[in-house]
Image: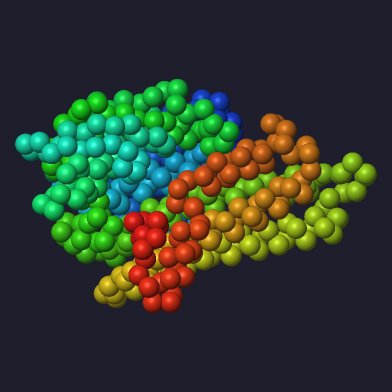
Amino acid sequence: MGHEVFERIEDASSELADRSAAADELGRLPDDVAKRLKDIGVVRMLQPADFGGYEADPRDFLAAVMDIGHSCPSAGWVAGVVGVHPWELALNEERLQEEVWGDDPDTWVASPYAPCGTATPVDGGYTVEGRWPFSSGTDLCDWVVLGAMVPGGGTDGVPFMVHVMLPRADYEIDADSWKVMGLEGTGSKDVAVRGAFVPSYRTIDATKVMDGRAAAEAGRTEPLYRMPWSTIFPCSVAAGLLGIAEGVLEHALEYQAGRVNAVGVAQVSDPHTRRTLGEAAADLRGARAQLLYDVGELYERLADGYQVTMADRVAIRRDQVRVAWRAVDAADRAFTCCGGNAVRLDKPVQRFWRAMHAGMNHAVFVPGPVYDDAAGMLMGEDPSGPAAVTF
């Protein structure tokens, strides 16, 4: 892959690695790391060209997120989560895009999308109330996009979900809400909104984002913006996780290359260790390849005018979940064979291992319901289980 950001990532890798511990101690990415990510341009990769973005092949974006995660777990995670928001903002009204990016195309937007609040209809928009956990990178963002349920719903009275966009002055960040055992540097704090007015042009129907109508209504016909939300968002989170898992292996290899175990055996010549690490490397390579293949195949078909089906959306969600679990299993095997000293806090491998397991608690990686609906789809049944709303 030849996108210009990759050379910048390589140039920044040592700096990002050196600042990884500082990010964990601070509980968010330091300002200089955020600036470095902006200089790299990773968060602008899915941003539309008409607002200063690269409008890149999504495979390049996912690979860039993984490569950043090799150096600093928290930086990779934030790059994936914050970096996916420009994709959705491109589907919103142009007036909102101008507000966010007009003066600075490097303006960052936080989330989360979970509908943890309410949006009550009023003249000209909504009054929004609620509290949302897990807003990754939020201290470094000037806007936030939040999921909220509209009580009473539409004409049929059924509640529905909207995504609402608020500027920094309209929401609060709970500075003490991110005390965790991994991914400390992501600063994934709670945000709260207390009765803020959100005009209609800063909102979007979440169902239209999911099923592709939002892109059509916005006139975004490019294949990037015709990708399903259920592909773009979960795969961006998965890319952050995979980069961290690959980092576990890289640091395990570095550590084992110079390690002599308690009975005097050099691990570099131990056949069990070599087999474990070799197998883990193959599994991680396979996980990366599958994620990029699925996204690339659909992206190329969309460029030829293809219409996405529910079967496509379900299959990619299934594979994305499997990719994450396969990667974590492989990295766990690599970490376990490193022995007791690997858990010492001065060993970088433990930081990656902790971050990886913290990341696996993200809701997009819950496997059972996704696999259940995926199998049903293969047997001719439409999704109807708990995961159906995520496709």
Q: Which colour scheme is used?
A: rainbow
Visible in this render: residue 213?
Answer: yes
Q: Nearer the viewer, residue 182 or 369?
A: 369
**What residue appears at the point 66 percent right and 59 percent down from the top-left corner?**
281
Residue 42, given in percent of the width and then of the height, sits at: 40, 47
In the rendered structure, the answer to whether residue 278 lies left or right of residue 296 reads right
**Quadrant assignment, res 24:** top right
**Quadrant assignment, res 353:** top right
**What residue appears at the point 65 percent right and 63 percent down from the top-left corner?**
282
Residue 302, given in percent of the width and then of the height, sits at: 31, 71
**Quadrant assignment, res 170:** top left
Q: Taking 153 as reference, is 302 above or below it?
A: below
Q: Which of 6 and 225 is in front in this view?
A: 225
Q: Taking 100 as reference, is 367 above or below it?
A: below
How many discs appear? Answer: 0
**What residue appears at the point 51 percent right and 33 percent down from the top-left corner?**
185
Q: Which residue lies furthest to the left in this view?
A: 123
In the rendered structure, the answer to whether residue 67 lies left or right of residue 330 reads left
Q: Residue furthest top?
A: 176
Q: Taking 277 as reference, is 192 above or below it?
A: above
Image quadrant holding the C terminus, namely bottom left
Residue 343, given in percent of the width and then of the height, sits at: 72, 36
Residue 100, given in percent of the width and then of the height, sits at: 23, 39
**What residue appears at the point 73 percent right and 33 percent down from the top-left corner?**
344
In the rendered structure, the answer to whether residue 14 lies left or right of residue 297 reads right
Visible in this render: residue 64?
Answer: no
